[in-house]
Each structure stands twice: as C-alpha cells, then as structure tokens.
Image (cartoon, helix red, strand yellow):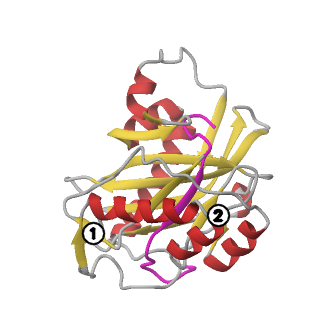
Amino acid sequence: MTFRSSLLVLVLLPARFAAGQEPPAGSPLRSLVDTERAFSDMSVAQGTRAAFLAFFADDGVNFAPEPVNTKKAIASQPAPAAPPAVILEWMPATADVSRAGDLGYTTGPWVRTERTEARRPLAWGWYFTVWQRQPDGSWKAAADIGTTTPAHALPGIDAFRAASAGDQPAATASPARTGDAGEIAAAERKLSELGAGGALGAYLACAAEGVRLHRNGTEPVVGTVTLAVKLAVLPFSLTLTVMLVLETVPVTLPAFGMVLVP
C-alpha cells in the first residue's frame, strides 16, 4: 500500500461516543472523521501524492518498516507526469479522540484499485492513523500504519461507527489529569518486561478494554476477550524498541499507547 506500510499495532484509547452513530456536529470527533473522509476524497481525485502532502503534519511519519518522514519522502520523488494508474481510497470505520481533543485516531479499510472503468481491486487491508490537532483547529496526520487483510472490506462498510460507549464527549469533557512522555515510556518498559515471558500475558496486563490488534493477513482483533483467544494460538515473546513518541503539551491522560512489534 502506497505510503502505508505493514506492522503489528496495539492501540489503547478511551471511548467517547455511543457506538453506531455519527458523532455530534461541531465535536472534535466529527471534525476528525470529516477530515479523514476529505483525505480519502483527495486521494481518489488527485492521487496519493497530493493527498498525503496536504493532510500530513510536517513531522508526520509512516512506517517502511521504520519511521520515515512522510512529506520529505514524497517530496524527494519526482511528481508523476500523468494521473496515477491506481486509486487508493479508504473510509473510517471507527475513530476516537482524547479528552482534551488534541489527539485522535481513525481506522478502517483501504483498497487500491486500477484507475479504469472496471476499478479492479489490486490490494486491500486496514489502516490506522494517529492525528494531532493543530493550533488553527485543523487535524494533521502524525503517524500512519497499514496492514493487509485476506479480503477487502470497503464496499461492505457503509456507515461510520464511533468507538464503544464510554466517557463524556470530548467537546464537554475536561482532562482528568496530565502527564508527560516519561510516564508513557514507563508504561512501555513495563509492557516490554512482561513481554519477555510471552506476548499474551503482557498484552492482557496492559491492554484497555477496547484494545485493537492489527496484523498482516488477518482482520483486526478488537477487545481483550478476542485478543486473548487470538494470541493463545499464536504464542510469541515480545521485544519493544521505542522509535517514536508523540507528545502534546500538556499530554492528556488517558491518551493513547502505541506499540510496534517486529
């Protein structure tokens, strides 16, 4: 997938809105979902180069497989002389934002098709994007990761579903408390130490209820119960190397944790 490479991703985020409905107009989540949809629309109309340059933060990264500055990587390549021969499109299936509305994520299916009338699919999978709110109120992609799946799901998902019911909407909630990158690093160390004895116990000890696990070749795994069943038949140890920390000032807790596993 162009500019969306393949990694296993574990993500924790508190839920804000009831499932199965569009987020309220004017809410941070609604603006994030609208941004993601506009991102995909530009990719279809103008190609991935224009879309990724427009919607990524200047320091935003994708993984190939190590983090790469997305804008610099694109700018280093010559612009195509003709419209791209393929179309990359996606849609947010679910999303969430932090209590302060300064960080968020979107995730859903992507598909790459021929730019022909037949639109034959060439590749497909699920993406996961971490977004950061800008001083002007807009959203920019800070980190973008993708995995492949056995079959593409884009035509079958026709409605957005907000993350499962949880705290009050971010538009009215106040941060419970604040922390810093050191606190996130401590959580990563704990997970890594537990992972030496096997990934299953480590993940279950640190995972939030709505944990998501994205791996190549499988559909996303959502929730601690499903995660336990999935990892029970895929035993492996866990070694973490922190390569990227996203931080806002102040960092709102609970915010998010992201673990990249080789």
Mark 2 → mark 1, Cα distance in angstroms: 30 Å
- Any part of residue 8 in sight: yes
Closer to the camera, 110 or 63? 63
**Residue at the location (50% across, 76% down)?**
208
State which region is magenta: 1-20
Q: x%, y% of residue 111?
A: 68, 46
When asked about the image quadrant of residue 113, the answer is top right
The secondary structure that most of the magenta stretch takes on is loop
Q: From the viewer's side, name the closer residue of 149 and 8.
A: 8
Q: How many marks?
A: 2
Residue 238 colored in magenta in the image: no
Q: Quadrant of residue 97?
A: bottom left
Asked if 197 appears above or below 44 in the picture, the reply is: below
Q: In this view, does 49 lie to the left or right of 69?
A: right
Which callout, 2 or 1, points to the residue nearer the camera? 2
| Nearer to the camera, 20 or 128 | 128
Instruction: Name the side, left or right, on which 142 lies relative to 232.
Output: left
Camera-side residue of 49 and 253: 253
Q: For mark 1, give the secondary structure.
A: strand
List x then y, in percent, for residue 188.
Answer: 43, 60
- For the N terminus, the quadrant is top right
- Name the amino acid, label 1: Thr
Q: Name the residue under label 1.
A: 252
Residue 160, visible in the rendered structure: no
Which residue, given by chain and number where applicable, does mark 2 sit on? 198
Instruction: Give, as a three-letter code, the residue at label 2.
Output: Gly
- The residue positioned 35% from the left and 73% from the top of the image is 254
